[in-house]
Amino acid sequence: MIWSFIKISLFVAIVVGLAFGAAWLSDLGETIRIVAFGIELNLGALQAVILVGLLVIAIWLALKVLGFVFAFIRFVTGDETAISRYFDRNRERKGYEALAEGMLAVASGESKLALSKANKAERYLRRPELTNLLTAQAAMMNGDSRKAEEVYRKLLADQRTRFVGVQGLLSQKLAEGDTDTAVKLAQKAFALNPKNLEVQNTLFKLQTEVGDWKGARDVLLAKMRQGQLPKDVHKRRDAVLALQEAKAVLDGGTSIEAQEAAIAAAKASPDLIPAAAMAAKAHYDKGDAKSATRVLLKAWEAQPHPDLAAVFASMVPGESATERLKRFEKLLSLRPDHEETRLLRAELCIAAEDFPAARRALGNLVESNPTSRVLTLMAAIERGEGEDDAVVRGWLSKALTAPRGKQWCCDKCQNIQSQWGPVCDNCGGFDTLSWREPAHNSMPLPNGAEMLPLIVPKGTKADAGETLEGTARAVSEREK
């Protein structure tokens, strides 16, 4: 309301000012004499001011007319004018409407309508970087992979749409199962946009599937540097990849590089059991038994595992059972209450024919966790203590139907594998295998040596050792 009052007051002041000005000019009494082309005009001051105002308006109108004439001439000759811009805006509006309708058609699954709208949008907009993607998506929905590939290849020609074109071709090759081409396309997409999380994950998954461990380590490092992967997770996964890279090098015959890679993997992640076992073997093969022992002790302290005990036993192959039990005390003292430590001690005592000590080592495992391995060891203890065959067969019968104990299980799909690997054989999950009790126990033991991973040295003729071998064979026959 105040603003309205101000505007009205300003208008009244202007009118009053003009009136006073006109009156003042009329009262001057002076005239202006104009002579042109034999015509003489005598004008008062007020008349002169009015004449000047009319001349200014006339000149302005003349310029506008002249500008319209020149604009009309440019329109006729093809230059851009307001008229041409009007028609351009009209085409652009229709084109974007068609583009929007095509996107909605893709979202709703109407592939033919989407193709029609994409063609219409291209006809109006003439912007292939926008319409080609819609055309490709519609063609894929319609099952026309050839047309979709053709359109994606067109996108490769434009720097702005090259990444989108590579991604489209990548999705096509993944759907077709062409892994080799998909890997190359994923590498190209990663080079164009290394910060794209979807491309990183796709390339990493493909590289782990085809065994490109070095390339997978590079992608993993890029993810860590970009803050998309915590440092501790990167450290663990890089150790897994380093281990697989070491295995690949070892398979190629260059064991020195494999040894160094395995040692590095074990240092990066001491709880990675396969890396620790391979690193210990590498140290031992190089004549460094002290370093091998140190690696095994550190890994055993992190997580006891039969593979670690097997490597530790292989370091002194000719020792007696009693000497082996004494040497293993260093390992057994690290995690004395762990189930694996108790089972290992029981096996060592059986090999040394100290059956009461073996029974004490098992303790209440028969009641708390009666696995095949526990029950088989009980059968060996009973045989070693001179029990009847019926008692021994009773324990073996229980062992054949008992749970298998800890195995390599996938935390993602619960698949059970006989050996550790970086990728789950079932779901393809990376670094998802852990040594634990499976949710179901229908799979066989990881390997026959699980029953006796290390304990009876070659040349030992103890009845207990023969009994253990027999019981292990019984379980193996059942698994077959």
Image (cartoon, rainbow, N blue to C red):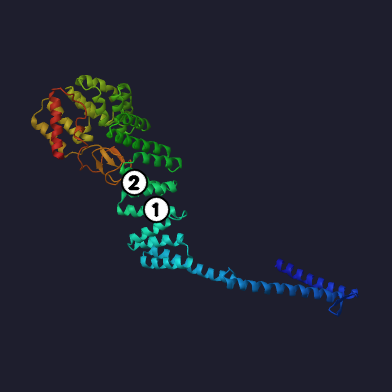
Q: Amino acid at mark 1?
A: Gln
Q: Secondary structure at mark 1?
A: helix
Residue at the extreme right of the image, as rendered: 29
Along the line of sight, the residue nearer the viewer: 97 or 368: 97
Q: Residue under label 2, please give it.
A: 206
Instruction: From this view, report whether residue 359 is shown above or below residue 418.
Output: above
Residue 168 higher or lower than 316, as above or below:
below
Judge left or right: residue 453 versus residue 48. Answer: left
**Residue occupying the far bottom of the picture:** 39
Q: Is residue 244 toward the left or the right of residue 10 in the image? A: left
Give residue 315's position: percent from left, percent from top. 25, 23
Q: Residues within 10 Å of mark 1 (few under 14, many from 20)?
A: many
Whether residues under marks 2 and 1 lie with C-beta atoms below 8 angstroms apart, the answer is: no
Place of residue 288 in the rendered image (x, y in percent of width and height, measured from the top left): 31, 22
Please, what is the three-letter code of the amino acid marked with disc 2? Leu
> What residue is shown at x 41% (from left), y 47% (from top)?
190
- Horizontally, is 400 left or right of 429 in the view? left
**In the rendered view of the protein, which quadrant contains the N terminus?**
bottom right
- Check residue 167 in the rendering and tell me which mark sits there, or answer none: 1
Residue 283 is at least partly visible in this image: yes
